Amino acid sequence: MTCPGYAGKIAVVDLGEDKVSIVETPERLCRDFIGGKGFVYALVSRYASFSSSDPLYDPGNVVVVAPGALAGLAPASSKVAFGARSPLSGLICDSYAGQVFAAKMKYAGFDALIIRGVAAEPVYILLYNGRVEVRSAARIWGAYTWDATAELKRETWRGASVAAIGPAGEKLVRYANVIIDGFRSAGRCGIGAILGYKRVKAIVVYGGRRPRVADPEGWKKSCVEVYKTLQSKPSAEYMSKYGTLRGVEACSKWSMCPGRHWRRPAPPRELVEKVSGKAFLERQVDRRTYSEYAGVIWGWACPVKCSKLVRPRIEGFEHLLVKPEYENIAMLGVIFDIYDPDEVLKLEWLVNNLGMDSISFGETASWLIELYSEGLLDRREVGGLTVEPRFGDPRVVEELARLTAERRGIGAVLAEGVEKAARLLGRGGERGVHVKGLESAAWDPRGWLGLALSYATADVGASHLRGWPQPRRRPSEGFDERALKTLIEDRDWKALLDTLGLCSFVPYEREEVEKMLKSALGRSVDEIWSIGWKVEAIARIYGALAGRVPEGDRIPERWMEPIPEGSMKGERAFRDLEEFRRALLSFYRARGYDEKLGIPTRETLERLGLTRYSWIVEAWERARREVERRLSAEAPG
């Protein structure tokens, strides 16, 4: 019998065998791993190959797509998880996109999609009304994400939802992303590159059958109550207007911007005001245009509706896009010393249509410009550029984006990500800002006590959505137990939301989540609270097999340089590396990880119920042996 709230089926597409299977969703998968993030880590760890050192070119790598457990059942249940072994880090990596794909996938009859093998020719995968088809995508191979989406909606249904890759994914750029319905991205980790290697241009979902819920009458009542409660909160009104648009104002105030490749964390006020929330909202389109996309741009039953449609004020530029989020503004503008809102919007449109993560691209390209500006690269080494690579010039960024997506000239180096690019060039590795191979999100932790520890220990690498210590304090105040406790609490809360498919920018609190869980799934927050810890434990085990744990639990050298100016002048991510080491060991102890190996102890696996899964236990035993061997080989004498 299908568990309440679930579609009850998983689609398994083996492209190498040209075979499609539809299997029942195991009850214990729903019970132990819930959905979304939980499903990704359970299924990737179960089915992906971990024998290859490079997951990008491994036919045994898998892509898992899983709606959150409350997708289509709760207000703002908009998130779908995409997961695979990341071509940047080798880690199991999960990335999220909003809008309506998650709900429509569940309404199409599926709790997850597992993609295995490599297709002989370009294809797209269609899920609809309990059925699965693999169709040719030869005619749209090479197309921008917007054009591919439009064509597939014409071919299938106007009301379908499309997750597509762009030319960057096809060319195996290691940080290629997945774009949902032409607007929103599952940006991190390079999932688009894995789909490109498998020759999957897109995934299309369509359906209208909502799963049965545990308490139909209670669910209807809860939906209305929670929607109204969320909508009435002051933070919802603010988010509805700005979303994360005002992030540059905050990062400048707190000296947390990535300006000029992390050397100008507090840009002056006159520059910040140019890319303020007001500047972008002034570029909104008219009501008629909104009506054309009303069913696409906002998350499922979202009471906030922060997405806004905008157009740059550039003559001859007629393209439409969703207003940028803070990460777009910071990593396509501020990091390059570009403060023209129209140029930032143009770059956002280009990078999304090429299908690249703006965060990873922004870090890698700005790192290159820093090397050139300081004389560590000469003109002959930046082949393909027609302009000199200097900060402040949007033409440089546009050319680098196109070269990268085409893997042409210096773009072939940038396409590898900052860690591998430094190895290819043989210099600049100490200047790269990444953790475990994943380029950092746009919040400099030198302005927030404990944030660097979150980056260093996050399951995927340097992600800003894996736990923020509270309240905000200066790192020079010293790391303490309060910072550790609140970091872990926030990490587990965000993992819970990602598992349920709830948007973390909608002001959900425990009480509202409890109502939706009880009425839709018949469960409680207490019952599933450990999902974040459980998933992190799996991530640590497979991170050790990838050679990233515990060796990769580090922070970039740039963040241990003192902030050069502003109100936070002199601050570092930690007062010194010894303090960071003590904080890391405190984290290991709090999570039940071996203090030397950085992976869960056997007792922790038992406590989390993971010893019931043979493949996880086998991986843990192998990881323990391999880490001990690596550490022994590194020991002096």
Image (tube, rainbow, N blue to C red):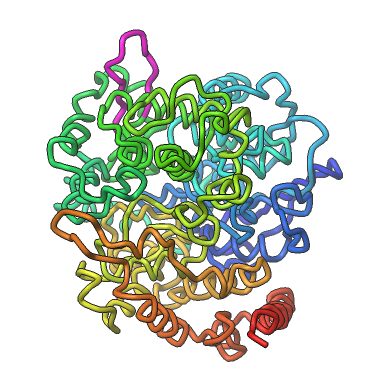
Is 483 in the magenta? no
| Magenta stretch in the rendered image | 308-321
- Residue 148 image offset from top left, x and y in percent: 58, 24
Residue drawn at (57%, 69%) of the image: 539
Is 312 in the magenta? yes
Residue drawn at (62%, 89%) of the image: 602
**Residue extending furthest toward the top:** 316
Residue drawn at (30%, 20%) of the image: 312
Residue drawn at (48%, 29%) of the image: 182
Height in image: 497 above or below 182?
below
Q: In which quarter of the image is residue 384?
A: top right
- Magenta stretch, main secondary structure, is loop
How many numbered discs, if any? 0
Asked whether 457 or 101 is in front, the reply is 457
- Residue 537 image offset from top left, x and y in percent: 55, 75
- Residue 20 image offset from top left, x and y in percent: 79, 45
- Residue 339 image offset from top left, x and y in percent: 25, 32
Asked whether 108 or 347 is in front, the reply is 347
Does the rendering let one see residue 613? Answer: no
Does the rendering let one see residue 509? Answer: yes
Q: In this view, does 19 lie to the left or right of 421?
A: right
Q: Quadrant of the C terminus?
A: bottom right
**Residue extending furthest toward the right:** 17
Asked whether 481 or 570 is in front, the reply is 570
Q: In which quarter of the image is the N terminus?
A: bottom right
